[in-house]
Amino acid sequence: MGQLVVRNLENSVKSQLQRRAKQHGRSMEEEVRDILRNAVNEHEVPSAGLGSEIASLFAKAGLTSDIPELRGNEIRPPDFES
């Protein structure tokens, strides 16, 4: 079994871990092992591309037509003089 040393842990975090371990009836070391086990065993949802993420945010906004893709268009700064 491997070992892990965590340095520079805030006192408040240590206190919270001690409280949490006491609530679960185990040592702080076992509590930390359980937290780490759960963290690495969580199933990560694969991230979609940025465009897909933005589209999902506005999926229920009521747009009925497609928004044209901007890829390949020249980017020009706005003209505030007009």
Image (tube, rainbow, N blue to C red):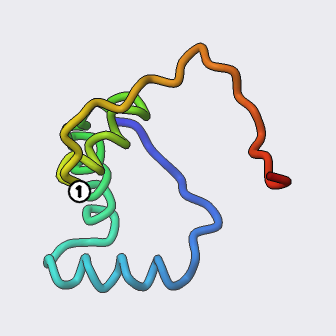
x%, y% of residue 64? 18, 40
Find residue 80 and report its horizontal and vertical position in percent.
80, 54
Crowd class of label 1 (few under 14; some 14 to 19; many from 20; radius 10 Å): few
Q: Residue at x 58, y 76 (%)?
A: 10
Residue at the top extreme of this rendering: 72
In the depicted view, which residue is nearer to us: 37 or 4?
37
Q: In the rendered view of the protein, which quadrant contains the N terminus?
A: top left
Most distant residue in the front direction:
82
- Answer above or below: position of 16 versus 65: below
Residue 25 position within the rendered picture, expressed as x and y whole percent measured from the top left = 14, 78
Q: Residue at coordinates 40% horizontally, 37% vertically from top-left?
A: 2
Query: Is 34 left or right of 50, judged from the image as shown?
Result: left
**Residue 67 versus residue 40: which sits nearer the camera?**
67
Q: Position of residue 71 (x, y in %)?
A: 54, 18
Find residue 65 and report its image quarter.
top left
The correct choice, above or below, for 53 with respect to 72 in the image is below
Image quarter of residue 48: top left
Q: Is residue 56 above or below residue 46?
A: below
Residue extending furthest right? Answer: 81
Placement of 23 over or under 81, stated as above or below? below
Which residue occupies 14% across, 77% down? 24
**Measuring 44% from the left and 23% from the top, which residue is drawn there?**
69
- Name the secondary structure under disc 1: helix
Pick the front one: 81 or 60: 81
The residue at which mark 1 appears reads as 34
Total number of numbered discs in the rendering? 1
Which picture quadrant has residue 49?
Answer: top left
Residue kind at label 1, given as amino acid type: Asp
- In the image: residue 30, left or right of residue 8: left
